[in-house]
């Protein structure tokens, strides 16, 4: 049986993404096949499609992903949907379960169906929509892992989120606020009200105020967009402050510094489940700019490339 899928045969602009017929995956081992209800198109997808990697990662990324185009031509890592087939070693999920999760390096979410290891999926309760369950994943896993598990943000700390309107940034604002921090967030002039609505105590128009002029010090500076490096972040930090570089270069990633946090967030069932719990208890409100049909996915990539996306953009097969 075939399915519709968004395919990237060669690196390039958004127009290289096309809809093609591909064989529907089957469930083997502990995998399940999910009928995709919604999947996000995010900066990670656009970075792979355009072969635009942080400094130093260009060669390693092409070696890992493909020299002239992605070996896994169907991109997409964050999805929600319904289980339609289970593998022989599946133990937790059943056919008909609503689920959400991350496919990681397998990708494949930009399609009608995809196979996912069951340990990467969390059940979606009835009170959470497919769109919210997909939108919370990409930015939410990154923000929660960095702020809770790596920086260990504590009540009363001052947190600066750079790029507060993006997928990672808007979750970071909400998660830092829910952990009792005093949150300052930067974004363009049109998104100041959004930042306040999400819980930022102080908002900064990035077009009018330079980062070096912000009234620190901050206990945590979370750079979601690659605006800082360790040297430019240092003046913003308190004596025990730490900076999170979500878009770190290769050199920044492999060079250990006492107050610099880099790395790649995990995306297992527990982390995903914690995000779903945040939606239920009201501490997380997914921000969705648009939901498009799969055949308009090139538009979604173009919007991500613009650098002005607010929250998440979803596609529905």
Image (tube, rainbow, N blue to C red):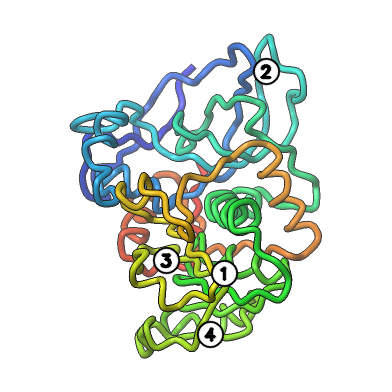
> Which element carries disc 1, helix, strand or loop?
strand
Can you identify the residue that label 1 sits on?
240
Is there a contact, CB below 8 Å, between mark 1 and mark 3? no
Q: Is residue 237 above or below residue 209?
A: above
State the image quarter where residue 182 is shown: bottom right
- Chain-order first, disc 2 or disc 3: 2
Calculate the distance from the C-alpha at mark 4 to the C-alpha at mark 3.
18 Å
Q: Residue 239, how many percent across, how many down?
A: 54, 74
Can you identify the residue that label 4 sits on?
203
Can you identify the residue that label 2 sits on?
86
State the image quarter where residue 246 is shown: bottom left
10 Å crowding of disc 2: few (<14), some (14-19), many (20+): many
10 Å crowding of disc 1: few (<14), some (14-19), many (20+): few
Calculate the distance from the C-alpha at mark 2 to the C-alpha at mark 4.
47 Å
Is there a contact, CB below 8 Å, between mark 4 and mark 1? no
In the foreground, 199 or 209? 209
Q: What residue occupies the far top of the structure in this picture? A: 88
- Chain-order first, disc 4 or disc 1: 4
> Which numbered marker is on residue 309?
3
- Chain-order first, disc 2 or disc 1: 2
Q: Residue 142, how many percent across, how many down?
A: 54, 52
Q: Say which residue appears at 60% left-offset and 70% top-offset.
A: 173
- Chain-order first, disc 2 or disc 4: 2
Q: Is residue 116 above or below residue 267?
A: above
> Which element carries disc 4, helix, strand or loop?
strand
In the foreground, 237 or 115? 237
Q: Say which residue appears at 45% left-offset and 38% top-offset.
A: 110
């Amino acid at each position: 049986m075939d399915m519709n899928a968004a395919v990237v045969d060669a690196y390039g602009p958004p127009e290289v993404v096309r809809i093609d017929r591909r064989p529907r995956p089957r469930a083997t081992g502990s995998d399940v096949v999910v009928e995709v209800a919604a999947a996000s198109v995010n900066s990670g997808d656009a970075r792979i499609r355009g072969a635009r990697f942080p400094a130093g990662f260009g060669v390693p990324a092409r070696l890992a992903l493909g020299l002239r185009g992605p070996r896994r031509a169907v991109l997409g890592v964050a999805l929600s949907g319904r289980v339609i087939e289970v593998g022989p070693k599946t133990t937790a999920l059943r056919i008909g379960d609503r689920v959400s999760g991350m496919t990681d390096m397998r990708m494949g979410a930009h399609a009608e169906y995809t196979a996912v290891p069951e340990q990467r999926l969390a059940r979606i309760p009835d009170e959470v929509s497919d769109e919210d369950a997909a939108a919370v994943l990409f930015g939410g896993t990154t923000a929660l892992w960095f702020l809770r598990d790596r920086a260990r943000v504590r009540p009363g700390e001052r947190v600066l989120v750079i790029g507060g309107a993006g997928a990672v940034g808007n979750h970071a604002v909400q998660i830092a606020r829910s952990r009792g921090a005093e949150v300052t967030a930067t974004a363009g002039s049109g998104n100041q009200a959004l930042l306040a609505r999400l819980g930022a105590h102080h908002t900064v128009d990035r077009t009018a105020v330079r980062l070096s002029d912000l009234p620190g010090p901050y206990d945590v500076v979370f750079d979601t967009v690659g605006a800082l490096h360790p040297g430019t972040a240092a003046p913003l930090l308190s004596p025990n402050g730490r900076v999170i570089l979500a878009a770190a270069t290769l050199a920044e990633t492999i060079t250990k510094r006492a107050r610099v946090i880099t790395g790649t967030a995990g995306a297992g069932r527990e982390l995903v489940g914690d995000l779903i719990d945040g939606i239920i208890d009201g501490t997380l409100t997914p921000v969705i700019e648009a939901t498009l049909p799969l055949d308009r996915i090139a538009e979604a990539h173009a919007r991500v490339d613009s650098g002005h996306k607010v929250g998440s953009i979803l596609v529905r097969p």
